[in-house]
């Protein structure tokens, strides 16, 4: 897939209306026999485990626990959440890749799923061949924030300063290869500037030092930084999505701010082991789609400044995953990003 088409996938996802999603869910609900046939059919009614690649309390865990009871209702089977954190999601992904492809073990991962093949050349699984994508649960925006006293008042100011002082302006991240690091690397690539990356051992310490003025810039998750933005402890410069977020309606997008073709999303895929029976896959996809139309689920996602991934043709999910992987593979290669 050519990189020029990468942003078109995420633009489609955020431009689809909630009404379309609800219509899709209504279509599933209108044919209850379709899901009723699923009850007890997936591996004879065994418990289904959502294997989460990160620790309890994180975004992937939240999404898994949000949809688990809805999946249980849709399938007529018990659905539990099992956190297997470690190695940037490799432990959980490796477990599901090796699992029996009967639908009883599903991976709930994060956007790092598309980055890991570029960062870790010896993964314990094949990213392309070990999984069957079932869906993307939600898309969440980031926001470029700065120390309130930072000289730049806009992204345009920042770019001008960075070009005048190559490598003299720093941004913090939660570590090498992290989402914040990659967001900064993409910014350098698209804006044609050179910044200095300052890795921390976690997003909390990084954000604290930006608030304290030790490092001026940070690519933050909107949900986790909104309170600090509203209190004035952080100043937002631009959101990283292709359209403005309802949580920060007056803050421009990167493209509006003058950085072309820039988009960074955090998202949560659901994947089954490769080789899953097509009928079982269809049942699981339908159950996930139905779960994602639940008003409480949609409300919770929107409260976190996110958008549900839209219903669409079967290739939409696989195309999105391929586009994300292509984008980050190029950035990791061109910016010479390494972990460890």
Image (spheres, grey):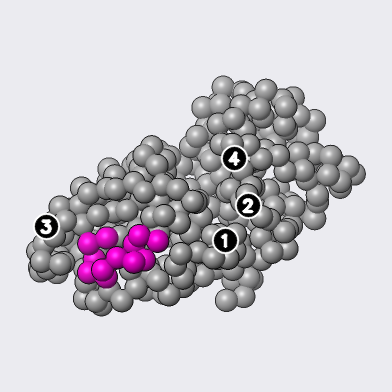
Which residue position holds label 4?
174
Judged from this view, the residue extending furthest toward the right is 164
Which circle marks residue 76 in the picture? 3
Instruction: Tell me which label, 4 or 1, sits earlier in the chain.
Output: 1
Q: Mark 3 Cα within 10 Å, few/some/many (few <14, many 20+)?
A: some
Q: Label 3, secondary structure: give it.
A: loop
Q: Does the magenta stretch include residue 255?
A: no
**Whole-percent x, y for residue 163 in the image:** 86, 47
Q: Mark 2 Cα within 10 Å, few/some/many (few <14, many 20+)?
A: few
Q: Label 4, secondary structure: give it.
A: loop
Q: What stretch is highlighted in magenta?
A: 94-105
The quarter of the rendered structure image containing the N terminus is bottom right
Q: Do the residues labelled 1 and 2 touch (CB within 8 Å)?
A: yes
Judged by depth in the image, the label closer to the viewer, 3 or 1, is 1
Q: Nearer the viewer, residue 102 or 91?
A: 91
Q: Which residue occupies 59% across, 68% down? A: 326
Judged by depth in the image, the label closer to the viewer, 3 or 4, is 4
- Marks 3 and 1, how far apart at CA: 38 Å
Q: Do the residues labelled 4 and 2 touch (CB within 8 Å)?
A: no
Which residue position holds label 2?
339
Instruction: Tell me which label, 3 or 2, sits earlier in the chain.
Output: 3
């Amino acid at each position: 897939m050519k990189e020029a088409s990468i942003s078109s996938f995420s633009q489609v996802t955020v431009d689809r209306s909630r009404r379309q999603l609800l219509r899709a869910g209504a279509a599933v609900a209108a044919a209850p026999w379709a899901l009723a046939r699923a009850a007890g059919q997936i591996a004879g009614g065994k418990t289904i485990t959502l294997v989460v690649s990160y620790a309890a309390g994180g975004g992937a865990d939240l999404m898994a626990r949000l949809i688990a009871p809805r999946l249980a209702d849709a399938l007529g089977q018990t659905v539990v959440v099992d956190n297997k954190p470690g190695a940037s999601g490799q432990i959980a992904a490796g477990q599901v890749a090796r699992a029996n492809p009967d639908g009883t073990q599903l991976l709930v991962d994060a956007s790092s799923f598309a980055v890991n093949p570029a960062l870790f050349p010896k993964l314990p699984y094949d990213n392309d061949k070990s999984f069957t994508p079932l869906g993307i649960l939600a898309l969440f925006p980031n926001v470029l924030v700065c120390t309130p006293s930072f000289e730049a008042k806009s992204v345009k100011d920042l770019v001008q300063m960075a070009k005048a002082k190559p490598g003299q302006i720093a941004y913090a991240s939660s570590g090498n290869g992290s989402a914040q690091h990659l967001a900064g690397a993409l910014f350098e690539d698209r804006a044609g500037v050179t910044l200095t990356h300052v890795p921390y051992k976690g997003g909390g310490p990084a954000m604290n030092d930006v608030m304290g003025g030790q490092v001026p810039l940070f690519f933050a998750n909107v949900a986790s930084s909104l309170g600090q933005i509203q209190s004035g402890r952080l100043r937002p410069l631009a959101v990283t999505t292709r359209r403005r977020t309802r949580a920060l309606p007056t803050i421009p997008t990167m493209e509006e701010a003058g950085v072309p073709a820039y988009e960074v999303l955090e998202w949560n895929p659901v994947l089954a082991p490769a080789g899953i029976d097509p009928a079982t896959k269809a049942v699981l996809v339908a159950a996930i789609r139905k779960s994602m139309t639940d008003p409480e689920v949609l409300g919770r996602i929107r409260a976190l400044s996110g958008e549900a991934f839209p219903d669409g043709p079967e290739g939409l999910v696989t195309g999105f995953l391929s586009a994300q992987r292509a984008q980050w593979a190029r950035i990791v290669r061109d910016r010479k990003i390494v972990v460890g």
